[in-house]
Image (tube, grey):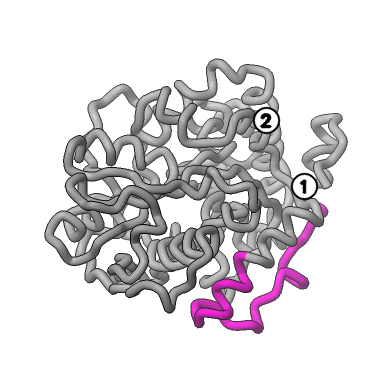
C-alpha cells in the first residue's frame, strides 16, 4: 500500500492547481512508493488543516498568512519554496456612491472583515494590508479614514480545496459576498476583494457595486504584496522521513510551471477551471506574463518580499517577531528537484 502525501492549495494562481487540473500528480507518482492525494478527499473533518498545517504528511501551496501563523503556533513545518504572482487587489463602493476615486474615501468607513470562525483570520489581514497600501498610494494613512470592523459569519471551510474543475456548475457563492452584503447594508463605505474572484463578484453584483481602485495598477511592488509570496510548506515528519516524496512533488510543480510557460494561451482555461471563474477573468486578474511566474523559487529577492509581508503582520500584532525565515527554509529539496528536471535551480 502506498504512502499518501496530502496536498492542499489555495484558490489562487498556483502550479499545484495546474498540476491538479491536468492530472500531473498521478503520472509523476505512479512508479513511486507514494501517492499524492488532495486534502479535499478527507472532507470537513480535516479541512481546517489547510490553515493549521496540523496534518502529517501534507504539502501546502498558498497564501503566506496561515503557514506563518501555524509556524508561530508550533506547527512542525519546513518552507521548501516560494512563488510570487501579482494579482488584482480591488476596492469597491456601492454603485450609487459619490466616490469616484480612492481619494474620495477620505474620512469614510473602510470595512475590515472579522471572521471569528477562522483560527487565523487571513482575510482580515489581507483587507487591512490592502487598505493600508492603497491609503499610502494616495498620500493618506489610517488616521484619514475609519477602519470599521465587519462581523462575518460565513463558512470559512467551504472554500478549502473545492474542486471546481470537473465541468460542474459553480454553486459556491462569491468568496467576498459577505463583505459586499455588508457594504450594501450600509455597514461600510468601501470593501476589499482580491484575485480572479473579483470578476465573479462583479458579475454577481453587477449594477450594485463599483470598483474605485486596484493596487495592481501601482508600480510599487511591495504594495502589491497581499498574502504573497505564496509559501510551499511541508510537514516536518515528511521532510525527515520521506524527503523523496517532497522532491517528487516539487518536480511536478516545476513541470506544471514549465508547461504554463510554454503554453500561455491554454493557461487561462486551466486556471479558470481551478478557480471557478471564466478564462477571461484569469487574463484580467494578473499582470501580463503571469504564466511565466509560477516557478517555485527560493531566490533572495522573493524571500525579501516575504519578509515585507511578515513585517506588516508583526507591526500590526498579527505575527510574533520571533517567527523568522532563517531556520525554517530548507533549500535541498528544491535544488534536487531542479537537478532531476535538468534545469538550473531557481535561486
Q: Residue at x 21, y 52 (%)?
A: 97
Residue furthest to the left in view is 185
Look at the image and say whether residue 318 sits in the magenta stretch: yes
The quarter of the rendered structure image containing the N terminus is top right
Q: Quadrant of residue 149?
A: bottom left
Q: Position of residue 40 (x, y in %)?
A: 38, 46
Is 142 situated above or below 165?
Answer: below
Disc 2 packing (10 Å; few <14; some 14–19; many ≥20)? some
Q: Secondary structure at mark 2?
A: helix
Is 192 situated above or below 112?
Answer: above
Q: In the rendered image, is residue 42 in sight?
A: no
**Dominant secondary structure, magenta:** loop
Q: Residue at x 53, y 17 (%)?
A: 266
Tag nearer the camera, 1 or 2: 2
Q: Which span of residues is magenta-colored? A: 309-334
Mark 1 / mark 2, whichever is N-terminal: 2
Q: Position of residue 288 (x, y in %)?
A: 60, 29
**What residue is shown with label 2?**
292
**What residue is shown with label 1?**
334
**Along the horizontal axis of the image, is 120 left or right of 336?**
left
Amino acid at each position: 500500500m502506498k504512502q499518501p502525501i496530502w496536498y492542499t492549495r489555495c484558490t489562487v494562481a498556483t502550479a499545484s492547481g495546474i498540476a491538479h487540473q491536468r492530472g500531473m500528480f498521478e503520472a509523476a507518482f505512479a512508479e513511486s512508493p507514494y501517492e499524492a492525494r488532495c486534502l479535499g478527499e478527507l472532507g470537513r473533518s480535516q479541512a481546517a488543516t489547510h490553515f493549521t498545517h496540523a496534518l502529517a504528511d501534507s504539502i501546502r501551496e498558498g497564501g503566506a498568512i496561515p503557514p506563518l501563523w501555524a509556524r508561530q503556533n508550533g506547527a512542525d513545518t519546513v518552507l521548501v519554496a516560494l512563488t510570487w504572482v501579482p494579482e488584482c487587489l480591488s476596492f469597491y463602493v456601492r454603485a450609487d456612491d459619490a466616490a469616484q476615486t480612492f481619494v474620495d474615501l477620505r474620512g469614510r468607513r473602510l470595512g475590515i472583515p472579522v471572521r471569528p470562525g477562522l483560527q487565523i483570520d487571513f482575510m482580515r489581514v489581507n483587507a487591512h494590508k490592502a487598505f493600508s497600501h492603497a491609503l499610502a498610494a494616495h498620500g493618506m494613512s489610517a488616521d484619514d479614514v475609519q477602519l470599521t470592523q465587519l462581523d462575518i459569519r460565513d463558512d470559512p471551510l467551504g472554500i478549502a480545496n473545492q474542486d471546481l474543475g470537473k465541468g460542474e456548475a459553480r454553486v459556491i457563492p462569491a468568496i467576498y459576498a459577505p463583505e459586499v452584503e455588508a457594504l450594501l447594508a450600509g455597514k461600510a463605505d468601501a470593501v476589499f476583494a482580491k484575485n480572479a474572484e473579483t470578476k465573479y463578484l462583479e458579475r454577481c453584483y453587477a449594477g450594485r457595486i463599483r470598483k474605485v481602485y486596484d493596487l495592481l495598477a501601482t508600480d510599487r511592488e511591495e504594495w502589491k504584496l497581499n498574502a504573497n509570496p505564496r509559501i510551499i510548506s511541508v510537514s516536518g515528519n515528511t521532510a525527515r522521513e520521506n524527503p523523496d516524496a517532497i522532491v517528487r512533488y516539487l518536480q511536478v510543480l516545476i513541470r506544471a510551471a514549465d508547461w504554463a510557460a510554454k503554453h500561455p494561451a491554454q493557461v487561462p482555461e486551466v486556471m479558470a477551471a481551478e478557480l471557478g471563474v471564466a478564462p477571461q477573468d484569469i487574463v484580467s486578474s494578473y499582470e501580463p506574463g503571469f504564466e511565466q511566474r509560477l516557478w517555485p523559487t527560493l531566490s533572495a529577492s522573493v524571500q525579501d518580499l516575504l519578509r515585507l509581508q511578515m513585517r506588516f503582520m508583526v507591526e500590526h500584532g498579527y505575527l510574533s517577531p520571533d517567527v523568522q525565515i532563517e531556520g525554517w527554509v530548507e533549500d535541498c529539496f528544491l535544488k534536487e528537484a531542479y537537478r532531476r528536471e535538468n534545469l538550473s535551480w531557481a535561486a
